[in-house]
Amino acid sequence: MNEVARPGESEVVPAPMPGAQPLVLRPDEGAPPPLAPTGRSGLSPLNRRRLDNFRRNRLGYASFLIFAGLFIASLFAEFIANDRPILMSYKGEWLVPVLVDYPEEKFGGFLAVTDYRSPEIRREIAENGWALWPPIRFSYDTINEDLPTPSPSPPTWMLSDAQCRPVAEKLGGTTCADLPQHWLGTDNTTRDVLARVIYGFRISVLFGLILAAVSSVIGVVAGAVQGYFGGWVDLAFQRFIEVWGGIPTLYLIIIISAFIAPGFFVLLGIMLLFSWVSLVSVVRAEFLRARNFEYVRAARALGLSNIRIMTVHLLPNAMVATLTFLPFILNGSITTLTSLDFLGFGLPPGSPSLGELLAQGKDNLTAPWLGLTGFLVIAVMLSLLVFAGEAVRDAFDPRKTFA
């Protein structure tokens, strides 16, 4: 076949056949197509579509942003609610009491730990420097001995000046505005409710995140092994899970708490023994469905190891179901810790806990701010997680679209 070169190019093209219409080529024809944009953060087109669907779900996306903002703020709880100054200057020296324990002898006292709320220490600081205090001048375990009313005391803004005057005059004031404000009142041991809510929210979410993350890893591994190998491996795992899942978790925690003082990591370890079971069936079903697909058989024929096939080819499909379940696993983990604290088998006494706040509300019906605060905080937190979880689930659903 005769070939002719296009003008200005070294590339040759076939000559037209006799009687055929002349072939007209555009200047850019034959050149490689331009590369498609990689998109935000190098995401694949499928993940970009999922992210766009998640953002278009306004309720779920707003719930996620609110929950994330509240959690990030709670990570800095010591800078929001504390009975120590954040920063202070004393006799020309810069001090950070919120991070460092300074002995009281530094301020002319005798105690090993400085009580910054005592009138003597505050007077000494005012005369020799200044202090920057947090917005809430109480930590979760601060005992306020100067309350206008007996504990549990209502919020300060609900009190009259006549009720506050005796304590205000003692502190050098005359009205309720001159007292340290308890915006949500105090509990039955004179501790600030708002400070305990902030710290309790942080503990609950951290407990749920750690438990959900670790249990998801264990559940994914167990489900992947069951679904990929099948046969007697699947059968043996299924029988074990049936027996293991039948153990009553609450009774086991009650028995263990009789020998070991319950704490954050003790409860986390006990709950981790059983929480991974809920995710196994979902991952197992995904691996059972995909292990006989053509691309998996081709990978085996090419000599790839089982570990590589499971992690590279099958795990991404199973992670879709895992990610959609993760917010609901987090929701269940937080609910479990709250229930244990409410029953008295959770965190040690004195720890900031939303469940313990609910228990105090039950025992002090004449102090409705305790029960209402605990209920509203838990209800809002779990609702935000449910709305965000539904948005994640819809984002991974290929049949779901948003305008």
Image: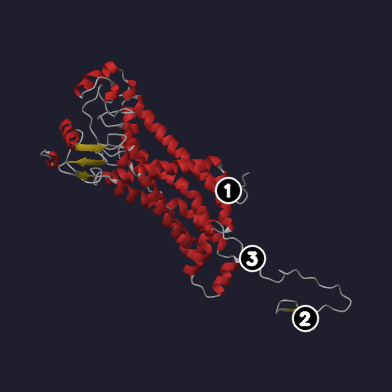
Q: Quadrant of the N terminus?
A: bottom right
**Along the line of sight, the residue nearer the viewer: 392 or 23:** 23
Which residue is located at x 27 percent, y 18 percent? 163
State the SS at label 3: loop
Asked whether 386 or 75 is in front, the reply is: 75
Query: Which residue was labeled with disc 2?
Result: 4
What is the three-letter code of the residue carrying label 1?
A: Asn
Structural distance between the alpha carbons of marks 2 and 3? 26 Å
Up/down of 255 relative to 172, above or below = below
Q: Are marks 1 and 2 in contact (CB under 8 Å)?
A: no
Amino acid type for the residue under numbered disc 2: Val
In which image quadrant can residue 142 be found?
top left
The residue labelled by disc 3 is 34
Q: Which is more foreground, mark 3 or mark 1?
A: 3
Q: Work out which residue is located at the far top of the displayed protein and give it.
A: 162
Q: Position of residue 293 (x, y in %)?
A: 59, 65
